[in-house]
Amino acid sequence: MPQTAPCHGCGLQHQCVCHLVPHLEAPVHIALLMHENELNRDTNTGKWLLKAMPSSSQHIWQRRSPCPELIKLIKNDRYQAYLVFPNERSIALNVVEQETDKKGKIPLLIILDGTWQEAGKMLRKSAWLSDLPCVHLEPSAQSDYQLRRNQQQGHLCTLEVGSEIIKELGLNEQAQALNTFLHHYMRVFKADKSGHALK
Ligand SMILES: [Zn+2]
């Protein structure tokens, strides 16, 4: 079989899924704050959220200083920033919707993109993050994410977090499109890793 170069868009060698990425329009800005370890992981699903959603952005977390681009967004009057992280003080997304609606602002939802352990570390080491109000999601289904082992049970992958946000905002069809893409991608990814296109 001739050796082909991987697609620049999706990184897959034996097939391309770029044309299958859904297009999402939601009244929210999702900012992925990525742990640097995530940059080199081909199991990272956050990149698909960025491709699917124009109102999203990616920022690389740094140990010593806040991310200037993300700080700009947080300070922007158009947005009201929240950290997507469940804790004893976190509020539900529908409460966020009500709060931002009243103020005429767009919710800026910051997702910590990394493993569960990395996310905890990012939060502990960044005062500028831990000062933000937290929001939790209320997913009804267990995570279907199977590409990584050792994930805490019920821990959603980044794309699933995005899809859950969209669903909880009432955009069921868009959330479903994103989930359908994820399921297809997982099968294609495994086939690709085994050296062939999905049959
Ligand atoms: Zn591709």
Image (cartoon, rainbow, N blue to C red):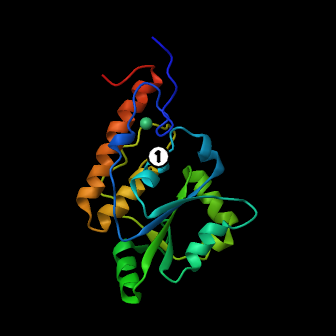
Observer-nearest of 23 and 48: 23
Q: Position of residue 187 (x, y in %)?
A: 36, 32
Q: Residue at x 48, y 78 (%)?
A: 79
Where residue 145 sits: x, y (%)?
A: 40, 42
Q: Quadrant of ligand 1?
A: top left
Q: Quick check: 98 above or below 51?
A: below
Residue name at image x 40 percent, y 25 percent = 191
Q: Quadrant of the N terminus?
A: top left
x, y percent for residue 73: 56, 73
Residue 156 makes an appearance in the image: no
Please indicate whether residue 71 sits to the left or right of residue 81 in the image.
right
For disc 1, the marked residue is 45
Q: Three-letter amino acid code at disc 1?
A: Thr
Name the one closer to the observer, 171 or 154: 171
Where 3 falls versus 102 (above or below)?
above
Which secondary structure lies at badge 1? loop
- Along the horizontal axis of the image, is 81 left or right of 36? left
In what quadrant of the picture does the C terminus appear? Answer: top left
Disc 1: residue Cβ within 8 A of ligand 1's nearest atom: no
Q: Position of residue 5 (x, y in %)?
A: 52, 25
Q: State the residue lying farthest toward the top.
A: 1
